[in-house]
Image (tube, helix red, strand yellow):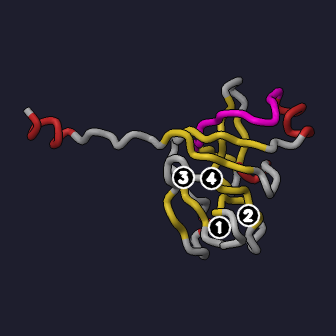
């Protein structure tokens, strides 16, 4: 998913094993981009597993997490923004609450769901 405010920028899907960084776009929205200053928003599917690195100390203290944590990308319903992450301790935050410059690695993409017609044709 990419928050609606990022749709004015080019987008690309997240890929397993790649590293991205949190970036503040000119619109003010925080999203993910590839390293190198490119303003192409990286869109992540819900339930994708990510590794967050360089979590600032103030966020660590607020969330009860360390500087490096595995999280799950989630869809939240809080105001105009929807993209968020869930930490292993159950805490959830919007991407907008992360700081620019954090490293984000895709550790596991959501598996492609099996559609009912695929199951029927496989039998």
Point out residue 37 in the picture as x, y percentages from the top left corner. 72, 71
**4 or 2: tag closer to the N-terminus:** 4
Q: Which mark is residue 44?
A: 3
Task: Say if 23 sits above or below 86 in the image.
Answer: below
The mark lying in front, picked from 1 and 4, is 4
Residue visible at 9% across and 40% down? Answer: 121
Categorize mark 4 by other alpha carbons within 10 Å: few (<14), some (14-19), many (20+): some
The reply to whether dot 1 and dot 2 touch (C-beta < 8 Å) is yes
Point out residue 38 in the picture as x, y percentages from the top left corner. 66, 72
Magenta span includes 106: no
Task: Say if 29 sits above or below 108 in the image.
Answer: below
Q: CA distance from mark 1 to mark 4?
A: 22 Å
For this view, does 109 lie left or right of residue 101?
left
Q: CA distance from mark 4 to mark 2?
A: 19 Å
When asked about the image quadrant of residue 116, the answer is top left
Residue visible at 65% across and 63% down? Answer: 33
Label 2, secondary structure: give it.
loop
* Magenta range: 64-74
Report which residue position mark 1 lands on. Answer: 5
Categorize mark 3 by other alpha carbons within 10 Å: few (<14), some (14-19), many (20+): many
**1 or 3: tag closer to the N-terminus:** 1
């Amino acid at each position: 998913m990419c928050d609606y405010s990022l749709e004015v920028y080019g987008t690309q899907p997240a890929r397993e094993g790649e590293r991205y960084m949190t970036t503040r776009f000119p619109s003010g929205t925080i999203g993910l981009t590839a390293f190198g200053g490119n303003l192409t928003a990286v869109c992540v599917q819900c339930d994708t597993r990510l590794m967050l690195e360089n979590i600032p100390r103030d966020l660590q203290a607020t969330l009860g997490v360390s500087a490096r944590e595995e999280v799950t990308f989630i869809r939240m319903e809080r105001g105009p923004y929807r993209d968020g992450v869930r930490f292993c301790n159950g805490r959830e935050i919007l991407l907008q609450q992360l700081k620019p410059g954090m490293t984000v690695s895709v550790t596991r993409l959501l598996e492609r769901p099996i559609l009912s017609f695929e199951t029927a044709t496989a039998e």
